[in-house]
Each structure stands twice: as structure tokens, then as C-alpha cells.
Amino acid sequence: MTHGSTSSAWSALARAIEGERRENSSPQSFARRPVRGVLVDAGPLVALLDQSDFQHAASVAALRTLRDPLVTVWPAFTEAMYLLASAWRGQKALWSRVETGALTLAPLDEGDAPRMRELMEKYRDLPMDLADAALVRVAEREDLTRIFTLDRRHFSVYRPGRRRRFSILPE
């Protein structure tokens, strides 16, 4: 598992985001700060860091088109860490993305739990896992519709609001 081919794309995104964060920094608590950017599911996080992943090239190409911050949720981050578990290097690289600001972890708390449960029940026939429910919940709460996912089948069905659809990357 290697991650060299994506280093420049991640670095460019992190530099752009860091400049924006300096402009928008405030003493507000993390939990209250609005979340902006492109949601990212576990699949692309793994594919970007694992050159042997069959979706690696498409994920790198999609990442290079993005200028907005990447945002994920703890359940998707946990899933990606599990899938990268065979090589500490991949897990270390993913942690590095959080530490450098190239990837933001959106806050979730007990107030989000009832809606995530409702979403999992609503989409039980797919079925919807916790990571997907958390991503959809953050999308609803923060008014986000762009998602970087390899799970087009599910995210083309999920609705972040009554009539809205996700704009799925890669296209």
C-alpha cells in the first residue's frame, strides 16, 4: 500500500484550505462551527491511499478537481482505518490528512443519533450502514450536497433533504 501518487494533490488541497482557515478562524468551539466542503466516504479515502485499489486512479483524478475542503465523519473514518489496517503506512497517511487539515472530521453528537436511526430505518432495504447515515445526517444539517464516494448505488438513492439529491464524485 503506497500513497505517493496522491501526495501532491493532497498537499495542494491542504495549502488552499489552510489559507481559507486562517481567514475564517474564530474562537468558536469546534462543535458549533459550520461545516463546509465536500463530504467524503470511506471508499475514496482508502482508494486514494492504496495504489493497488482498482478505484485509485479515478479517485486521484477526482481529488485533483476539488478545491473545497474534504469532510468526513468518525464512522466513515473508522471504516477507512479498518480497511487500511493491513498496512500501518496507510493508516498513518490517513491520520496525517486529518492533522494537516486536508481532511476534516465533522462533529456528531447524541442530538444527531435519532435522525441517523431514522435514516437507517428508512433505507433498511439497501441497507444503510452507520457511516452512510452519519454522512447523510451531516449533509442535511449543514446543507451539503456534494459527496466523494465510490458507493454511487446507495448515494444516488439517499436524499439529503426532501427533494434534493447528492452530486456524486467522481462523475
Image (cartoon, rainbow, N blue to C red):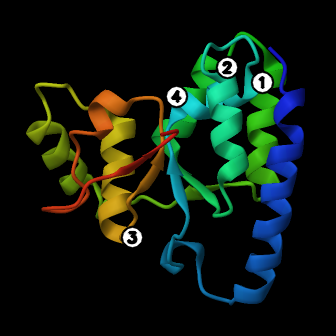
> Which of the labelled discs sits on residue 142, or is there none?
3
Please tell me which of labels 3 and 2 falls first in the chain. Answer: 2
Displayed quadrant of residue 16: bottom right
Three-letter amino acid code of the residue under disc 4: Glu
Three-letter amino acid code of the residue under disc 3: Glu
Distance, label 3 to label 4, CA atoms, is 22 Å
Please tell me which of labels 1 and 4 falls first in the chain. Answer: 4
Q: Which residue is mark 2?
A: 84
Q: Which residue is mark 4?
A: 79
Circles 2 and 1 in contact, beta carbons < 8 Å = yes
Q: Which residue is mark 1?
A: 90
Q: Is residue 34 left or right of residue 47?
A: left
Residue in front for this viewpoint, 118 or 164: 164
Please tell me which of labels 1 and 3 falls first in the chain. Answer: 1
Distance, label 4 to label 2, CA atoms, is 9 Å
Q: Secondary structure at mark 3?
A: helix
Q: Residue at 32% of width from left, 51% of height from top?
A: 136
Residue in front for this viewpoint, 105 or 144: 144
